Image (cartoon, coloured by chain):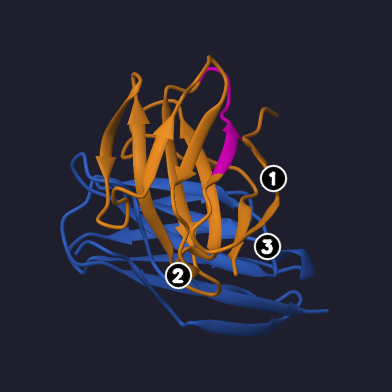
Amino acid sequence: EPEVTQTPSHQVTQMGQEVILRCVPISNHLYFYWYRQILGQKVEFLVSFYNNEISEKSEIFDDQFSVERPDGSNFTLKIRSTKLEDSAMYFCASSEALQYNSPLHFGNGTRLTVT
Amino acid sequence: SQQGEEDPQALSIQEGENATMNCSYKTSINNLQWYRQNSGRGLVHLILIRSNEREKHSGRLRVTLDTSKKSSSLLITASRAADTASYFCATASGNTPLVFGKGTRLSVIA
């Protein structure tokens, strides 16, 4: 069964550094998402992406964050200047149709640790 | 907020028993989805129930939806140790992003 893959599985970075989290969504999916989960907490929506542009973003997704689909397969999340509170699991997801009609397929996440 | 809230926060049962988890939400929805998350892994979609459906089955899973009470339940029958995970409900409304609850941590003891 096709799956969403994320790399790296674990990223340690120093406060103020830039990080890029990478995702390869399922190939025939059109909608892409980033969610994050602070340890033991709820899963929070960050951003959705369709047709090469952001379709929705949450208040968490401030100017420090950006997303890009640089080629036909990768979908990246960049955090420009990391803060301690950015430490979390970051999940990429994709879906065939808009998320309110179609289930999301999640990757296994990147654990980001900001020191 | 349309956020789903699961109840209980944690549930511990013996293998073979049934596990019931509940989800309540606040606003009207298009559909409600249940996901499972094994420790340190991504969420896996289990079942989607639309607002005009009342009950849905998938294997050992049974989901009900009561839109008048704004609540849903997930029943896992004949639980197994491998069912140990966190279970999340997520509500979809209009064109807003899927909103997840805080989850129920299920422990199935062999």
Q: Quarter-wise, where is residue B99 in the image?
A: bottom left
Q: Secondary structure at mark 1?
A: loop
- Residue B27, by quadrant, is bottom left
Evaluate if marks 2 and 1 touch, with contact meaning CB atoms under 8 Å apart.
no
Q: Is residue A113 above or below residue A106?
A: below
Left or right of B53, for residue B17: right
| C-alpha distance separating marks 2 and 1 | 19 Å
Nearer-the-camera pick, A36 or B106: A36
Q: Residues within 10 Å of mark 1 (few under 14, many from 20)?
A: some
**Label 1 sits on what residue type?**
Pro
Whether callout 3 and callout 2 share a subunit is answered: no
Colour chosen for chain B: blue
User: Which of the 4 quarters of the picture holds residue A47?
Assistant: top left
Q: CA distance from mark 3 to mark 1?
A: 14 Å
Q: Position of residue A8 (x, y in %)?
A: 69, 45
Amino acid beneath label 3: Gly
Residue marked by disc 3 = B40
- Chain name for mark 2: A
Q: Position of residue A6 (x, y in %)?
A: 64, 40
Which is more N-terminal, label 1 or label 2? 1
Chain letter behind tag 3: B
Label 1 marks a residue whose chain is A
For the residue pair A61 and B83, the one nearer the viewer reads as A61
Q: Read off the residue under disc 2.
A: A85
The reply to the same-chain question for discs 3 and 1 is no
Secondary element under disc 2, as helix, strand or loop, is: helix
Q: Nearer the viewer, residue B27 or A11?
A: A11
The residue range painted magenta reads A20-28
Q: Which residue is mark 1?
A: A8
